[in-house]
Image: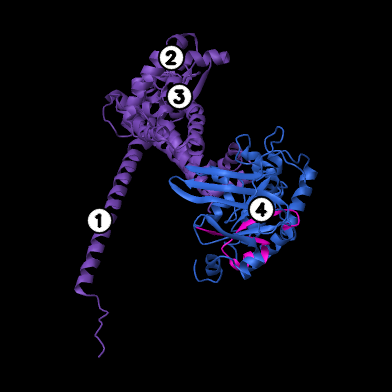
Chain colours: A blue, B purple
């Protein structure tokens, strides 16, 4: 495993807290411990801990307002952008706590990509949507290399065949599902190691959803994926591990099969059987 | 038993309809009233001003020789000379200097008539000496009098001779002043707006700044004139009456307009564009520069154009820094005494001669068409580049 340096200087080793794990046959990619988040006076997360396993899809489910999106957005520090937010606890990624003072968030976000609920392509061409981040990060300098990267990213996102003849068309001219796949291609163009997805299919029709789900399945070969979803079937279909959030706490976290078939907690069972939520 | 439901309007419903019609009539009435005033104003301006765009010209033979260069009135036939504008006679030595081969020759030219003759022919006044009246009639019967386009209105500066007065120096002054306004208020305004909207923390201090900027837009413009006088002229020693002083003073007025419209344009860019950029590893400034600014540019430009147009029509603050002055020659630098279009109109409006009434109206028409052009540009820009989400 290649160690990524988020600070620019020598790697700091942070103690990884030991915690209860549902099944220890995977290496841990990100380890969250005692994460608590306040928005002003209101506490959104009450000290949750969770391990994210490498090359697996981890789904976060739970009723609206349970804190699952907040949790997701703490993993690449997007919550820092919210005014009046306070975050406590540790998120360890590549042996470094991403909330440590020497971690640079801009550097961090180039290693942990994100796909949003509503497709948000840049109001530029399809090509520029992909090429933007590698260019500003200085990863690719030559035009021909960039062409290759754009093609590779679009192919990986399953969009290449549909757009290869109109790379100069505006990203916003694509359909909703295509826009979302463009956003995924954009996120993977900088080769992050973790991909965060915040209800990526909630604005898409069933056909586009199926395409994106299939894509997620393929992407886990190369990436570690954390996905927030309201769609329980989707969690069952794509995720290897599932965490059930309720009122800012993780009620249950285990591999998806056991969570859906033999939930340990009554609340989980109520939620997945639709009796509540 | 089925209940009898009547679908006819009840008396109460009819009363509600009447109230609605009444209210609509008030609104239409208010609209018609404002349109009527606007039409009245424009038609009056056009009626008063259109005649200033044309000017009476008289065809005459002009002789250039040693004597007429000294006593320029003698260059034209004795009987016609009183009808010709003094401005022409003054130009004779210059013409001969420019082209010495004219010396000793005679040429037939269309000469600008005096304002008195012009006003008499346009029937604004009947005060013309009987002798001149008969000469004019004779010339008219010979076909030697006609109307020509008043080029001087656009090519010459202000003059005490009404037939020679024009807007050129005011044009140049306006151009310089607007250049200063743009150079000062655009970068400062946009940078301020970006900081307040994108970077500033939401605390007492920035809230105070925000309230003050909004209030600044409502401060009477004469106060900005006083500020300009005290700060720029008295403290920094910027030359009085200069385009630089005027531009700096008007920048103070334009700044809040630009800041407010830029902030509105930035706020209109959806938050998820910023987040999308930052999520792929763009810094805050990169997200703004590469995605937010290009999207909000049409809005920023629209606000800037409207702010500049507002400054262009402003007169009160310029009163205090000496820009309402008689400026016959166009300024050639930022620090020379200058005047601007609305100030020129103000000056002309105060002149006693009848001819200046037309000139004032013509000046207003020119200023209005300039402002309409600017505002139309702003509207076109907005419609052309507006992005819908």
| Disc sitting over residue B173 in the figure | 3
Residue B240 position in % (x across, y down): 40, 15
Foreground of the two, B84 or B174: B174
**Residue wearing tag 2:** B236
Quarter of the figure that contains the N terminus of chain B: bottom left
Q: Dot 1, how many residues are within 10 Å of its Cα: few (below 14), some (14-19), or many (20+)? A: few
Q: Dot 4, how many residues are within 10 Å of its Cα: few (below 14), some (14-19), or many (20+)? A: many
Please tell me whether mark 3 or mark 1 is closer to you in this view.
Answer: 1
Label 1: state its secondary structure: helix
Query: Which chain is indicated by disc 1?
Result: B
How far is mark 2 from mark 4, CA to CA? 64 Å
Q: Is residue B5 magenta?
A: no
Query: Which chain is indicated by disc 2?
Result: B
Query: What residue sits 66% from the left and 49% below the top?
Result: A30
Label 1 near label 3: C-beta < 8 Å? no
- On the same chain, marks 1 and 2? The answer is yes
Q: Earlier in the sequence, mark 1 or mark 2?
A: 1
Label 2: state its secondary structure: loop
How far is mark 4 from mark 3, CA to CA? 69 Å
Residue B344 seen in the current view: yes
Please say if B49 is above or below A221: above
How far is mark 4 from mark 1, CA to CA? 67 Å
- On the same chain, marks 2 and 4? The answer is no
Label 4: state its secondary structure: strand
Query: For the magenta stretch, what is the residue range?
Result: A219-246
Residue B104 position in % (x across, y down): 53, 13
Please say if B177 is above or below B122: above
How far is mark 3 from mark 2, CA to CA? 21 Å
Query: Which chain is indicated by disc 3?
Result: B
Q: What count of labels does the image hold?
A: 4
Foreground of the two, B354 or A5: A5
| Disc sitting over residue A52 in the figure | 4
């Amino acid at each position: 495993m290649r160690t990524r340096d988020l600070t620019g200087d020598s790697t700091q080793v942070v103690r990884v807290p030991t915690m209860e794990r549902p099944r220890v046959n995977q290496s841990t990619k990100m380890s969250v411990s005692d994460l608590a988040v306040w928005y002003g006076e209101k506490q959104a997360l009450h000290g949750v801990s969770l391990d994210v396993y490498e090359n697996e899809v981890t789904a976060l489910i739970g009723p609206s307002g349970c804190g699952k999106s907040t949790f997701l957005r703490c993993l690449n520090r997007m919550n820092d952008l919210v005014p009046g937010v306070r975050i406590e606890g540790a998120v360890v990624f590549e042996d470094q706590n991403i909330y440590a003072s020497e971690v640079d968030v801009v550097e961090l976000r180039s290693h942990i990509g994100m796909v949003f609920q509503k497709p948000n392509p840049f109001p530029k061409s399809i090509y520029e949507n992909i090429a933007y981040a590698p260019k500003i990060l200085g990863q690719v300098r030559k035009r021909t290399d960039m062409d290759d990267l754009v093609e590779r990213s679009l192919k990986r996102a399953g969009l290449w065949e549909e757009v290869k003849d109109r790379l100069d068309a505006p990203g916003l001219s694509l359909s909703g599902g295509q826009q979302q796949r463009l956003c995924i291609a954009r996120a993977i163009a900088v080769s992050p190691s973790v991909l965060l997805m915040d209800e990526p299919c909630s604005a898409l029709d069933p056909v586009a959803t199926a395409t994106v789900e299939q894509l997620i399945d393929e992407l886990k070969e190369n990436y570690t994926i954390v996905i927030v979803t309201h769609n329980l079937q989707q969690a069952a279909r794509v995720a290897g591990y599932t965490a059930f959030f309720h009122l800012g706490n993780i009620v249950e976290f285990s591999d998806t099969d056991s969570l859906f078939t033999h939930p340990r907690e009554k609340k989980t069972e109520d939620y997945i059987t639709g009796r509540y939520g | 038993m089925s209940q009898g439901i009547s679908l006819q309007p009840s008396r109460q419903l009819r009363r509600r309809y009447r109230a609605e019609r009444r209210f609509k009539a008030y609104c239409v009435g208010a609209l018609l009233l404002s349109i009527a005033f606007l039409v009245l104003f424009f038609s009056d301006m056009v009626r008063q001003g259109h005649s200033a765009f044309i000017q009476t010209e008289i065809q005459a033979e002009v002789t250039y020789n040693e004597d007429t260069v000294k006593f320029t009135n003698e260059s034209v036939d004795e009987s016609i000379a009183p009808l010709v504008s003094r401005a022409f006679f003054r130009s004779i030595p210059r013409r001969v200097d420019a082209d010495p081969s004219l010396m000793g020759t005679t040429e037939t030219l269309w000469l600008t008539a005096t304002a008195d003759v012009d006003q008499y022919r346009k029937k604004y006044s009947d005060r013309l000496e009987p002798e001149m009246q008969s000469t004019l009639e004779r010339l008219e019967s010979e076909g030697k009098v006609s109307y020509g386009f008043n080029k001087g209105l656009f090519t010459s500066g202000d003059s005490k001779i009404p037939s020679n007065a024009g807007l050129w120096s005011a044009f140049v002054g306006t151009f310089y002043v607007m250049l200063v306004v743009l150079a000062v208020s655009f970068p400062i305004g946009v940078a301020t707006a970006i900081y307040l909207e994108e970077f500033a923390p939401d605390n007492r201090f920035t809230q105070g700044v925000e309230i003050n900027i909004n209030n600044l837009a409502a401060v009477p413009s004469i106060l900005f004139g006083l500020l300009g006088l005290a700060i720029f002229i008295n403290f920094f020693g910027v030359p009085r009456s200069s385009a630089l002083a005027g531009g700096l003073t008007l920048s103070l007025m334009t700044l809040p307009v630009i800041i407010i419209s830029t902030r509105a344009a930035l706020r209109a860019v959806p938050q998820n564009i910023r987040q999308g950029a930052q999520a792929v590893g763009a810094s805050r400034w990169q997200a703004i520069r590469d995605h937010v600014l290009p999207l909000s540019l049409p809005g920023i430009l629209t606000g800037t154009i409207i702010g500049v147009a507002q400054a262009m029509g402003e007169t009160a603050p310029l009163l205090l820094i000496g820009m309402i002055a008689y400026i016959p020659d166009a300024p050639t630098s930022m620090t020379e005494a200058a005047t601007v279009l609305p100030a020129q109109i103000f000056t002309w409006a105060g002149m006693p001669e009848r001819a200046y009434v037309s000139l004032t109206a013509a000046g207003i028409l020119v200023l209005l068409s300039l402002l309409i052009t600017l505002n139309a540009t702003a509207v076109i820009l907005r419609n052309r580049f507006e992005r819908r989400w």
